[in-house]
Image (cartoon, rainbow, N blue to C red):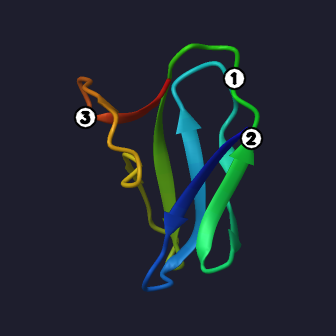
Amino acid sequence: MIQLEYRDRRITLAGVRLLPTAAMAPVSFAHRDGAWQARFEPPPVDRLEYLLELRFRNGRTTRIPDPANPLRAPGPFGDKSVLE
């Protein structure tokens, strides 16, 4: 089981999703214990590249690498986080 967490210290987010590059559908995070958390079965791949999509209360969205995961993969549109 993979577990990811995103801390929203200023409580400005309305939602968080994991956006994988392949092998699985996006995964929505649930807000509990002061953080956004997601648990999911690992996809059938050796390496998963992903971004987090942050949805703010005003409706704006942005995509970022996972700040809790130091592993990165460079790409033409910026870095992605990596799970191996």
From what the image shows, is residue 40 above or below residue 31? Answer: above
Tell me the kind of residue under disc 3: Gly
Give the CA separation, mark 1 to mark 3. 23 Å
Q: Secondary structure at mark 3?
A: loop
Q: How far separated are the C-alphas under marks 2 and 1?
A: 9 Å
Crowd tier of the residue under label 1, counting other residues whose Cα lies within 10 Å: few below 14, some 14–19, many 20 or above: some
In the image, what residue occupies the spot 26% across and 31% down? 77
Local crowd size for mark 2, using a 10 Å CA cut-off: few (<14), some (14–19), many (≥20) = few
Q: How many marks?
A: 3
Residue at point 50%, 23% (across, down):
84
- Residue 4 at what x, y percent from top left? 58, 51
Q: Which residue is mark 3?
A: 78
The type of residue carrying mark 2 is Phe
Measured in 3D between alpha carbons, the distance from the residue under mark 3 to the one under mark 2, in whole angstroms, is 25 Å
Q: Amino acid at mark 1?
A: Pro
Residue assigned mark 1: 43
Residue sitting nearer the eye, 60 or 73: 73
